[in-house]
Amino acid sequence: MQRLLAIAAATLFALPASAQSSLGIQGATLSLGAAQDEAGDAQPHASAMLDVAITSVHGLQGELAFEDTANGVIGHMGAHLYMAPRPGQKYGLFATLSDVDGRSMAWGTLGIEGMLSLGDETVLQGRTGLGVSDVDGLDFIFAGVAVAHAFSPSFEVEAFADIAEFDEAAFRAMSIDLGVSAEYSPEGAPWSIYASLTQSDLSGRDGAPSETRLGLGVSMTFGQSGGTDPATRPFRTSDPVAPLVRRGLW
């Protein structure tokens, strides 16, 4: 985990310079904020995204994220290999790797995803995949969908739903997160502020009471990144195991 933190820190500081290079980098985003966890405590988080063009229709999106919880810092790395064969469409494969600082616990996911423009200001995303943890053979399947709409060049709202099923002898439950986020960026400014509200539910044999999470933060964008055009909008990510770690269930 310490090595992962060191790599992430170096990457975060390199983003602004990299985004202005001529190495095929299209854009980058750095976000810092805090979110209320299931215990009601505010926990900081940070993330970075980098989008690189491989060919005129193929690209690679990489990401790093860190989320502090009462049960340890979750570190996350992800990669999205995608193609955009025509305007308004983007789809591909993704893979992620996560772990918890100070614990012998790691998990990974693999899946497919896509993005489709529903109009000049609206975009739909979907993803599905499977994952596995190195603790007690935990495996799971998951899916997610999100719709974003830009009410103006400065204000955007996204609604999302994520579901994951854990069906093991040691743990059996279904996780459902429903939420909405809003982002405001002054026209022409490279920074934005965002807020999110998520209802997190865990049902089944090993379920837990529903919790509401509130997140606030600020983002900096370099190059062309964001908006509701699939050509520049990054794929969103979700971590199916993070709710279990935050609740101290795994």
Image (cartoon, rainbow, N blue to C red):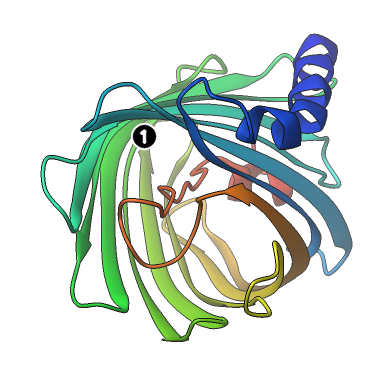
Q: Residue 39 appears in which quarter of the rendering?
A: bottom right
Which residue ends up furthest to the left in the rendered image? 86
Marks counted in the figure total: 1
Task: Estimate the x, y position of residue 121 in percent, counting from the top left.
Answer: 32, 79
Question: In the visual, does 227 lie left or right of 229?
Answer: right
Task: Estimate the x, y position of residue 206 in percent, counting from the top left.
Answer: 51, 50
Does 144 appear above or below 27?
below
Q: Residue 116 appears in which quarter of the rendering?
A: bottom left
Q: Which of 28 and 110 is in front in this view?
A: 28
Task: Estimate the x, y position of residue 244 in percent, counting from the top left.
Answer: 61, 45
Identity, as a three-letter code, of the amino acid under mark 1:
Phe
Secondary element type, mark 1: strand
Does 39 appear above or below 111?
below
Q: Residue 14 appears in which quarter of the rendering?
A: top right
Q: Nearer the viewer, residue 106 or 5?
A: 5
Q: Nearer the viewer, residue 62 or 113?
A: 62
Task: Estimate the x, y position of residue 139 in percent, counting from the top left.
Answer: 39, 27
Which residue is found at the position 62% from the left and 79% from the top? 187
Residue 93 visible in the shown view: no
Question: In the visual, does 163 lie left or right of 153?
Answer: left
* Quadrant that contains the N terminus: top right
Residue 180 visible in the shown view: yes
* Quadrant that contains the C terminus: top right
Question: In the visual, does 80 lie left or right of 247?
Answer: left
Does 35 appear above or below 107?
below
Return the residue at label 1: 140
Which residue is found at the position 64% from the left and 72% from the top? 188
Question: In the visual, does 125 lie left or right of 148?
Answer: left
Which residue is found at the position 16% from the left and 54% from the top? 87
